[in-house]
Amino acid sequence: MDLLQSYKDPDMEEEDDEVERQSDSRPATTTTSDQDPSPDSSPIRISLPSKSTAPKIDDTMLSLTVAGKLQSEAKKPLNPTQHVVSFNPTYDQLWAPVVGPAHPYAKDGLAQGLRNHKLGFVENAAIEPFVFDEQYNTFYKFGYAADPTENNYVGDVEALKQYDGVSVYNIPQHEQKKRKLEKKKETLEQLENEGNDLMDSEEVDNPATEAWLTKNRKSPWAGKREWLQGELTEEQKKYAEEHAKKKGEKEGGEKEKGEAHADKSTFHGKEERDYQGRSWIEPPKDAKASNDHCYIPKRLVHTWSGHTKGVSAIRFFPKFGHLILSAGMDSKVKIWDVFNSGKCMRTYMGHTKAVRDIWFCNDGSKFLTAGYDKNIKYWDTETGQVISTFSTGKIPYVVRLNPDEDKQNVLLAGMSDKKIVQWDMNSGQITQEYDQHLGAVNTITFVDNNRRFVTSSDDKSLRVWEYGIPVVIKYISEPHMHSMPSISLHPNTNWLACQSLDNQIIIYSTRERFQLNKKKRFAGHIVAGYACQVNFSPDGRFVMSGDGEGRCWFWDWKSCKVFRTLKCHEGVCIGSEWHPLEQSKVATCGWDGLIKYWD
């Protein structure tokens, strides 16, 4: 190292001095090499000035170009299709009409995407239609309007001062009328004054002159009150009578009643009374239950055919069952003999449309019918005469009499207008209306010693009512519930069997809470869409129902298992009734028009 230092150039020495000066100017770092130089230390680092290898470029033209582009963009109108604006547009640019890129194939040079009118692109002006209409009408009425671009008015300056700059919508209507009348009065006064000076008496008397017209000017309606009504033509009289009749009916508040029809009845038996003078409806003296145990029927015993259309309901004569009543869709009600001849005994013809429901009174001497002709009729079973007719103008779906012996004159009917109507049949007056359901009422079932009754409806709910009080005491409606078009009371009166349209029979308790019995559910039959009647055997051991395929199903009450099915009818088996005395006999009816008796 000493030898190398001895061979140093003077130029190198100068450079070393410069390096030392630079190192002195930098902050000193305490390292071991600076403190203790030795021959093994690293050589001195020389920092060289940095130089760029890229060639120098004059960017004056580039900056001028960018500035010119921005300047030209700032002068250009905005394109409505672009989403980003790279500069701050001026007010003039924002309000300039829309101009799109020129299109080589369009006649006006406007691209199809920008065209929204046959003349090009039409942009909505930033002015409300009401404000525009106000200024438009003000201009055509008073001759001036507000200029939207400046805080100024255009048009007739004198009119602006005269009317104090009001618009047509600012003037109240009574003020407008007042002004019109004042203006009219002024013109008439002017004409009169001018006319009095200029007109001669001859001109005033001559209808051909202007003076006479001015003097005798009248409104076109001036003589309207003096017009007297002439004699009406026959057509006008007829129309006036019809109108008066309709008006009278409307004012009288008469409700639409059911269709009127002559009531008839035909007796088909040999004689109405026997040699001892007993009526044909009297039950046999020896009719009584042979035993208390019921059995499931196996074979067909008898078929009654007489209805020309389907049979909608059947009812056995109360307590004895020696007669069976049937309601047909051919608008006829028939009563058939069960014990002896097995023939039709009487036909009751009082409805014009299909009969929906039938119900016997407690002793069977009278019965109710409800038809689609909106009538409810109360018949004498023996004579076939109609005792009374009731109607609200709506279709009755179900009719029931109060089962109490002292209330056999009380009729309840579930109507298509969501109401349950209660009549006193002695007076013919409506005594109560139970109006809470949201759909047509399908069933009425008395429970709790006839103090309450349960109703079901198309609204998929059950409602429990206190008899005579139109307030629901229990409302049962669950999301899983379906409409229940048939309900039957168990012989022990503790349970209700409800035919649910989801192809099952569900059981509710008739005690205070009316709870669903989840352990009892009878299924297997197809009844969706049909109001198939559900029923119990007299001893309560079996549950019975028809179905949509013409079968009759029997279930065991305790186990809920299917006991037997019988193919009864072609089509729907709509009704099924267990005989009240003969424990193994069942009657079924269907839409094939037949009533069948099974043993």
Image (tube, rainbow, N blue to C red):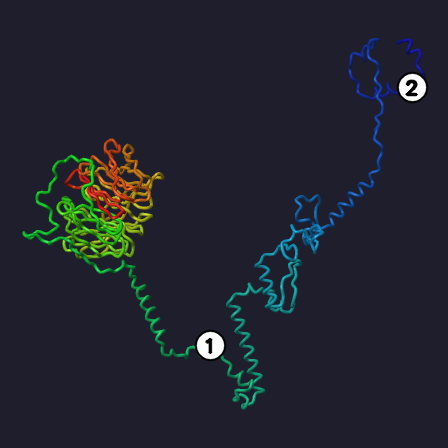
* Left or right: 581 as drawn, with respect to 591: left
Q: Quadrant of the C terminus?
A: top left
The picture quadrant where one finds residue 319 is: top left
What count of labels does the image hold?
2
Q: Give neighbour class at mark 1: few <14, some 14-19, many 20+ (Cα, 10 Å).
A: few
Nearest the eye: 482 or 544? 544
Residue 464 appears anywhere in the view? no
Q: Which residue is mark 1?
A: 221
Q: Give neighbour class at mark 2: few <14, some 14-19, many 20+ (Cα, 10 Å).
A: few
Residue at 90%, 19% in the rendered image: 15
Which amino acid type is shown beneath numbered disc 1? Trp
Q: Which mark is residue 14?
A: 2
Q: Position of residue 445 (x, y in %)?
A: 23, 44
Q: Quadrant of the N terminus?
A: top right
Which amino acid type is shown beneath numbered disc 2? Glu
Residue at 23%, 47% in the rendered image: 594
Answer above or below: position of 178 versus 461.
Answer: below
Secondary structure under the numbered disc 1 in the rendered image: loop
